[in-house]
Amino acid sequence: MRFFPVKRASCVKGEILLLGDKSIACRSIIISAISCGKTTVENFPPNKDCLYAIKTFKNLGIKITQNQKVKTITVFGNGLCGLKKPKGPIFVGDSGTTLRLTLGVLAGQNFAVTLTAGKSLSGRHMLRVTAPLRMMGVEISARRTPKTKNLTPNTKFEEYPPITIRGGNLKPITYRMPVASAQVKSAILLAGLYAKGKTCVIERVKSRDHTERMLRLFRAGIKVNDNAIIIKGKKELVSPGRIFIPGDISSAGFFMVLGTILPNSRILIKDINLNPSRIGIIKVLKRMGSDIQVSGNSAVGFEPRGDIIIKSSKLKSTIIKKKEIPSLIDELPILMVAACFAKGESVFEGVGELRIKETDRIISMSENLKKMGADIRVLSATSRGGSAKNCGGKTVRSEKIIIQGGRSLIGATVKSFGDHRTAMSMVVAGLAAEGKTRIDNITCINKSFPNFLSLLKTIIH
């Protein structure tokens, strides 16, 4: 096995421009494909997830061209019902956004499709999306196993890819989200485009609203009333012609933390996504004492964007509440690194969703940071009211991570667990740790951020 070496950096200085937000880019392909007209998507990120989204809709009969020199793609939409039955099963890789949102679109097509997935995504829970789609009248079959954790209420089983779906003749529903999930919400809203009448999704805690913003841009009949999103079906979408995807704030998070914890550092990140449902990491880092300046904040197009300047800071501990988690779920691994350098005890509450990402990120981050000398505890509150260091097969109500910061990290041999965000978090930790760090496999970074290491080289001193 070839290990990737990381040694301590003295500081980071410079200016970077990030490729487009992965979540928005995947949505741009899917929604453009079912709209009327040609859509050119600018600042398109050629990561694995987005490339699988392109392949998926090419298999469904959509013409998509790419111009890598100017970082654009062009999608030739065929309208709501213009998709074609593929020749066989469609492989979506490990792109959860592509799988779940495509299920919403296929719910309205009058043919059957089987979606298969990579090893990581094949182990992620899908009942949370297949259950509401069945309520709308969709025929779905999936791989089932007995359930060991109560992640989807009132069932004795869980579902996983491969998934076969046959859509058509949908009925509108009102659905109260049991768990905050932008992907599940988006799948229901996309299916609602095909239902006769109004479909309503009600959220207890607001999740990312990229789908709502983009559907509005494509002239969908969508309304947002507080925590209720209502979409009118049987209305064709109309392409706006061009879309610019702002820089990915989840990718920016690694540079934000690195610029904060390394002394004598200053980084300017330009044209970054500043969607209010995505800036949780900025709020948390500011609360911890990070010197972050946000400028611009202009709503050009359909997503607000601007520039961020990060300078070295002395961090203090914080408590991240469960209600904050939906706005920074992907940034929790790198915030755990930040907490190691903060004075005092930081608490991450309600982090159970980290168990069901590309890997169990509670395990991947806690094991790695412990190897580097961090003081981390993981507590699980069970239905019996007790606490344990792991789930042990019991029904889990909530979990929290406690990090006692203020002590130096020491270089160690760590694992990526095949997870892109774990890998990048450990690169950042290694750059700030004493000694040398070795990471077992970093190819997984290509899932979301293929030019991460090359950008790092431009600012490391």
Image (spheres, helix red, strand yellow):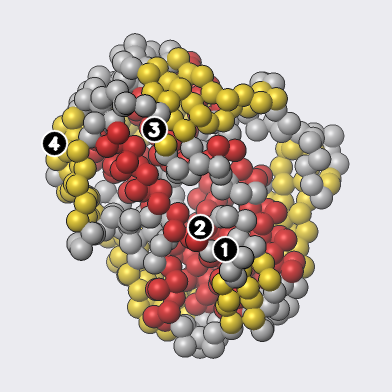
Q: Which image quadrant is residue 452 in?
A: bottom left
State how far apart marks 2 and 1 are (Cα): 7 Å
Identify residue for label 2: 444
Identify residue for label 1: 441
- Tell me which numbered mark, 3 or 4, is placed earlier along the sequence: 4
Residue 139 can be seen in this image: yes
The amino acid pointed to by label 1 is: Asn
The amino acid pointed to by label 3 is: Ile
State how far apart marks 3 and 4 are (Cα): 25 Å
Cβ atoms under marks 2 and 1 closer than 8 Å:
yes
Name the residue at 25% across, 26% down: 83
Give how far across and how far down residue 103 sits, in percent. 41, 28
Cβ atoms under marks 4 and 2 closer than 8 Å:
no
Q: Nearer the viewer, mark 4 or mark 1?
A: 1
Q: Look at the picture and state if 12 lies above or below 220.
A: below
Cβ atoms under marks 4 and 1 closer than 8 Å:
no
Cβ atoms under marks 3 and 4 closer than 8 Å:
no
Identify residue for label 3: 90
The amino acid pointed to by label 4 is: Gly
Name the foreground residue: 3 vs 298.
3
* Mark 1 surroundings: few (<14), some (14-19) or many (≥20) residues within 10 A: some
- Tell me which numbered mark, 4 or 1, is placed earlier along the sequence: 4
Name the residue at 42% across, 39% down: 92
State how far apart marks 4 and 1 are (Cα): 42 Å
Q: Nearer the viewer, mark 3 or mark 4?
A: 3
- Tell me which numbered mark, 1 or 3, is placed earlier along the sequence: 3
* Mark 2 surroundings: few (<14), some (14-19) or many (≥20) residues within 10 A: some
Q: Look at the picture and state if 415 lies above or below 455.
A: above
